[in-house]
Image (tube, helix red, strand yellow):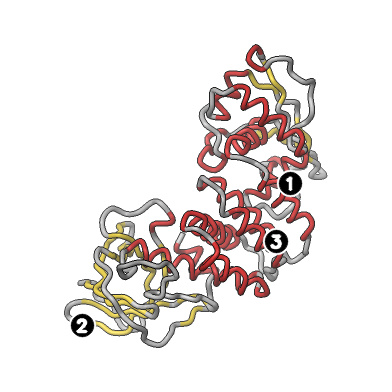
């Protein structure tokens, strides 16, 4: 993750020395070959930090440091932040570093908008502020006309829970774009970006947040399709968590074909009531029926014969529509035609139709539960 962020956030700038404070239990994780190592942070400011370390770093060295609470290596994204830093000085106890933050970063350590009786110096507070500043900087690069409104929304308009979701959406979209080898300019319609941050901030799980991030990444295209992007936002904002599981299961399980011209087709998909209970992760079959009908009304599942009683149902059709398959591809940050997302490159390269396997092993990305 640090390597992709390092690539995408160039050019970096460092700021004049700012107020430094201690943050108990804050650590900086760095890598020594394949092994992670930690240094305690003696003090930190918006411009840099002093680390207790025995590492023989030299002034001018560029480091990749992951800030987190000291202890085991964090795997949850909102509890850590990777920042590039330049070694400024070295002495017997440690090293002073200057942070190389992206242009447009509005890092406000010790200036929290949250009213509290104690200073916001816990490691989680520091990490949250770094993540927020980086998210706003990303918005400033892809949609500069939305920066002021995005900053106002994220610093003053969202609860802590919604702020965490909106921040994760922006940062994950940045990572998705960093993985591409596309040198085309990245620009997004300000209205689309603000709608994604506002509506996506309600997402309850990380994989749905990543769906919103995928939609944000696809909105950052050289060719502008604001109406298409707004349609994706509208659809995603009308889907609950259970409905998202059914939507993802439908798109994942359905057998798809891509012809030599890149046209995508899909076979009818039927599932047993037991399988639907497993996909939706709920035993409330009446709830599942209502959710499927809602997806039908949104145009994401093909309309079929109305069931007389879901509680007695053996099989139900949940065939994804072309609209659903396109939305699912965009939820994963795919900016080209949907056919290219579903076709294995080895098959498509030879111009033969390819059968796409369900691939249920990617449940951490889709929310699908079990086989």
Residue at the limit of the structure toward the left, as seen here: 92
Q: Which mark is residue 192?
A: 3
Q: Is residue 352 visible?
A: no
**Which residue occupies 60% across, 59% down?**
197
**Which residue occupies 31% across, 75% down?**
44
Tag 1 secondary structure: helix
Tag 3 secondary structure: helix
Q: Report the label total.
A: 3
Q: Is residue 344 visible?
A: yes
Which is nearer the N-term, disc 1 or disc 2? Answer: 2
Q: Position of residue 26 (x, y in %)?
A: 28, 65
Q: Position of residue 259 (x, y in %)?
A: 79, 39
Which is nearer the N-term, disc 1 or disc 3? Answer: 3
The residue to which callout 2 is attached is: 91
Q: Which mark is residue 55?
A: none
Which is nearer the N-term, disc 2 or disc 3? Answer: 2
Q: Position of residue 347 (x, y in %)?
A: 70, 40
Observer-nearest of 214 and 254: 214
The residue to which callout 1 is attached is: 338
Q: Disc 1 versus disc 2: distance between alpha carbons?
A: 55 Å
């Amino acid at each position: 993750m640090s390597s992709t962020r390092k690539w995408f956030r160039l050019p970096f700038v460092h700021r004049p020395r700012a107020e430094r404070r201690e943050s108990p239990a804050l650590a900086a994780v760095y890598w020594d070959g394949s092994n992670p190592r930690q240094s305690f942070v003696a003090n930190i400011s918006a411009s840099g930090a002093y680390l207790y370390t025995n590492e023989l770093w030299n002034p001018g060295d560029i480091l990749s440091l992951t800030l987190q609470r000291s202890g085991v290596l964090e795997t949850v994204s909102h509890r850590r932040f990777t920042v590039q830093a330049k070694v400024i000085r070295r002495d017997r106890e440690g090293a002073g570093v200057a942070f190389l933050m992206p242009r447009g970063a509005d890092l406000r350590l010790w200036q929290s908008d949250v009213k509290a009786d104690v200073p916001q110096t816990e490691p989680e507070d520091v990490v949250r502020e770094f993540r927020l500043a980086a998210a706003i900087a990303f918005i400033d690069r892809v949609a500069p006309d939305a920066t002021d409104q995005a900053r106002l929304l994220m610093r003053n308009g969202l609860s802590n829970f919604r702020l965490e979701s909106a921040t994760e959406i922006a940062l994950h979209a940045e990572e998705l774009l960093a993985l591409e080898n596309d040198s085309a300019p990245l620009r997004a319609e300000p209205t689309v970006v603000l709608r994604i941050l506002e509506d996506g901030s309600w997402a309850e799980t990380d994989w749905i947040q990543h769906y919103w991030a995928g939609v944000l990444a696809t909105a950052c295209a050289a060719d502008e399709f604001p109406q298409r992007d707004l349609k994706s936002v509208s659809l995603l904002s009308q889907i609950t968590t259970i409905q998202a599981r059914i939507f993802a299961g439908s798109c994942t399980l359905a057998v798809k074909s891509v012809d030599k011209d890149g046209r995508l087709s899909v076979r009818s998909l039927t599932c047993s009531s037991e399988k639907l209970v497993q996909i939706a992760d709920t035993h409330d079959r009446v709830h599942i029926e209502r959710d499927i009908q809602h997806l039908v009304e949104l145009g994401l599942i093909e309309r079929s014969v109305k069931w007389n009683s879901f509680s007695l149902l053996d099989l139900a059709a949940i065939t994804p529509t072309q609209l659903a398959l396109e939305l699912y591809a965009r939820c994963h940050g795919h900016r080209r035609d949907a056919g290219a997302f579903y076709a294995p490159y080895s098959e498509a390269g030879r111009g033969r139709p390819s059968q796409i396997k369900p691939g249920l092993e990617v449940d951490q990305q889709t929310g699908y539960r079990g086989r």
